[in-house]
Image (tube, rainbow, N blue to C red):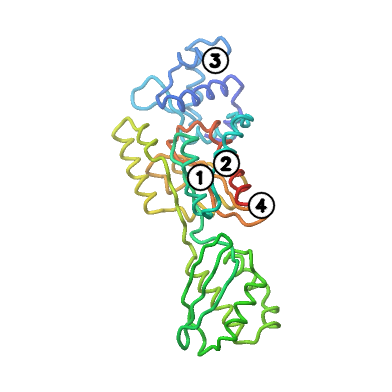
Amino acid sequence: MTDTGFAQLNERAREIFRVLVETYTATGRPVASRTISRALKTDLSPASVRNVMADLEDLGLIHAPHTSAGRLPTQAGLRFFVEAVMDAPPLSGKERARIDAMVADLDTAGGVDQVLERTSGVLSGLSRCAGLVLAPRHNLRLKHLEFVALSPGRAMVILVGQDGTVENRVIRLPGDIPESLLRQAANFITHHYAGLTIRDIGRRLAADIETVRRELDELAARVVAAGIATWSRDNAGERRLIVRGRAHLLQDAERAEDLERLRQLFADLEEKRGFAELLDLAEDGEGVRIFIGSENRLFSLSGSSLIVAPFGEEGRDIVGVLGIIGPTRLPYARLIPVVDYTARAVTRLLS
């Protein structure tokens, strides 16, 4: 199984492989040479198809499960299909309009959280698989911030987001800070950083250290740094995972081993195992990312595939990723454009 071997596949071998994979993703069952022969556009006998299938098997693209006469694509075969064989046509105008209408119904008046909750359901409905949305737990954009003294050495930071969300943290301060200095620190943050997320503010503070020292005295600067550092530390690594449509996965499970893999997958989802790494991977790339089977350690025991794409706000940082999760026999050619367009539509909505 080498790139050179893949490159040597002629058009007939690629067409037979394409038909095999597409038939498998539609039925979930081993595909026989006779079935492929009937589906080909050219007149090719089952015996000739079997000869080509033997070559594909030697390359590690397909395999024979148990004693079945049919063949299934391997994980490497599915990856090769997605990257080199699959033809994923763009969504039709009707399909785009349908997604636009569904996303338009995600009322932003309830805040970003509500949008993300309902987006997961939209993806499940579009794919007939499980839809998921993964984002930092706290990503609200600052509208206003206040420091309220509680006791010597302690204060409460009250943050009001642009979507109306109000959150607070108790922080430790260097000694007894007067109210006037707390107001000065809060006004500095609100004036310079309104509209940014806490993560963005933390980054900007590090770059604007000279501005902080120039506009604030040393004690006020320490209050600003303590408030943002505490908030950033509390939220570091936290992720909100929203999954809808798990029942769709159960409907496709026909064998005991399928149910066991799903049980493992559901356990992984509940424990959010590996999702922080998944979010980082998806954020590093542009557009759709596809993880097949054990390519991502989260799914190594569940035999699942994931199609995800980043979403955010136009011209700003990525907020998170959205996509669908299902068996490795996903109809990739149909779902990849769906996930991609939905991510773009949600980005437009959030913007």
As drawn, 156 above or below 81: below
Q: Is residue 295 above or below residue 89?
A: below
Task: Say what secondary structure mark 4 lies in.
Answer: loop
First reached walking from the N terminus: tag 1 or tag 2: 1
**Label 3 vs label 4: CA separation?**
44 Å
- Amino acid carrying label 3: it is Leu
| Residue bearing mark 2 | 342
Question: Which residue position is annotated with label 3?
Answer: 40
Residue carrying label 1: 119
Residue at figure coordinates x 64%, y 77% from the top left: 188
Q: Is residue 265 above or below residue 47?
A: below
Residue 316 picture quarter? bottom right
Disc 1 residue type (three-letter): Thr
Disc 3 to disc 1, C-alpha distance: 39 Å
In the current view of this chain or complex, which residue is farthest to the left?
256
Amino acid carrying mark 4 in the image? Glu
Q: Earlier in the sequence, mark 3 or mark 1?
A: 3
Q: Report the Cα–Cα distance between label 1 and label 2.
A: 9 Å
Amino acid identity at mark 2: Thr
Q: Residues within 10 Å of mark 1 (few under 14, many from 20)?
A: many
Report if the CB atoms under discs 1 and 2 are less than 8 Å apart: yes
Nearer-N-terminus badge (2/4): 4
